[in-house]
Amino acid sequence: MKTMSALWASWLVPISLLAQPGLDTNHFLAVLRGATAVELPAAAARLVREARPDTRVATVTNVVKLALQINPAATLAVVEIVSRADPADAARIAEVAVREQSSLVIGITRRAAAAVPAQAAEIVAHTAFLMPETLLDIAVTAAKAAPAASLDILHAAAVVRPELRPYIEEEIARCRPVAPSVSGCLSRALRIQIKMEKGDSDRHGSDPGDSHPRRPGPPDHKPPHEGEDPPGGRNYARP
């Protein structure tokens, strides 16, 4: 995963680069409109593969945006196939798609992370940055699609929600040497942060709904499996 500063820097490239010299958006539109609904994702991927290196980011941005405007129903297929064609820009592809179809953020995250597991953390950073209130669902979805990226996904969550960083780091440390569960670690970090906001300084007290205080587990204690339903953590305030 990129460093946190690199992740922030990657967002500085404008999402709308419609007037970049050498970028023939009319050609993109003609190719995409000439494709059938079934052919549209592959046509978009071909345009991206043919882009010059100096126009690659702008091409990805415009092609994905135009493809989804032409056929919104093809959103998930476009995200997956274009991401496979241009793995280095999978996070930007997902970001553009979420800007166009925000209600599909979970499906977009799933398809992009499954297509390019190595970019799962960046995909989380880009999509959750647009919709921080769905951070938990986005992160858990990406971790299910790319389990090996769980640790990096948690670090990406800390970039999106900096106020969670100390609690996420505490949860990661608590899970060692076992690979952290994104669902368990991020859910607990969110609950602790909410309690701290309410003035509860006892970060090791009982969780809401628990009948007994939490006690540290043995050294070989394992976090919940990734397949478990994420407990709570939804609809929290946008930073």
Image (tube, rainbow, N blue to C red):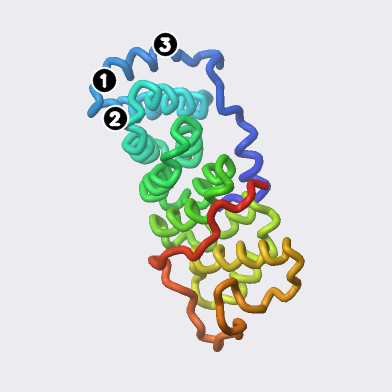
Task: List the residue tagged with mark 1.
Answer: 35
Between marks 3 and 1, how big is the CA–CA gap? 14 Å
Tally the numbered discs: 3
State which quadrant residue 228 falls in: bottom left
The front one of 103 and 30 is 103
Discs 2, 1 touching: Cβ within 8 Å: yes
The x and y percentages for residue 197 are 73, 61
Q: CA distance from mark 3 to mark 2?
A: 18 Å
Q: Nearer the viewer, residue 35 or 160?
A: 160
Task: Give the class, few, some or many, for how many residues have Cα within 10 Å of label 3's Cα (few <14, many ≥20).
Answer: few
Q: Which dot, 2 or 1, sits closer to the camera?
A: 1
Asked if the residues shown at circle 3 and circle 1 are in contact, with their CB atoms under 8 angstroms apart, the answer is no
Q: Where is residue 213, by image quadrant? A: bottom right
- Residue 26 is labelled as 3
Q: Secondary structure at mark 1?
A: loop
Q: Earlier in the sequence, mark 2 or mark 1?
A: 1
Residue neighbourhood size for the residue with mark 2, other residues' Cα within 10 Å, grouped as few (<14), some (14–19), many (≥20): some
What's the residue at 44%, 33% (across, down)?
101
**Image vertical order of residue 160 relative to residue 12, above or below:** below
Using residue 189 as the reference point, say whether residue 70 is left or right of it. Answer: left
Classify residue 96 as left or right of residue 45: right
Q: Circle 2 — which element?
A: helix
The tag earlier along the polypeptide, 3 or 1, is 3
Identify residue for label 2: 42
Q: CA distance from mark 2 to mark 1?
A: 9 Å
Mark positioned earlier in the residue sequence (3 or 2): 3
Q: Position of residue 61 (x, y in %)?
A: 48, 27
Q: Amino acid at mark 1?
A: Ala
Is mark 3 in CB contact (under 8 Å) with mark 2? no
| Image location of residue 13, percent across then percent down | 61, 31
Amino acid type, mark 2: Ala
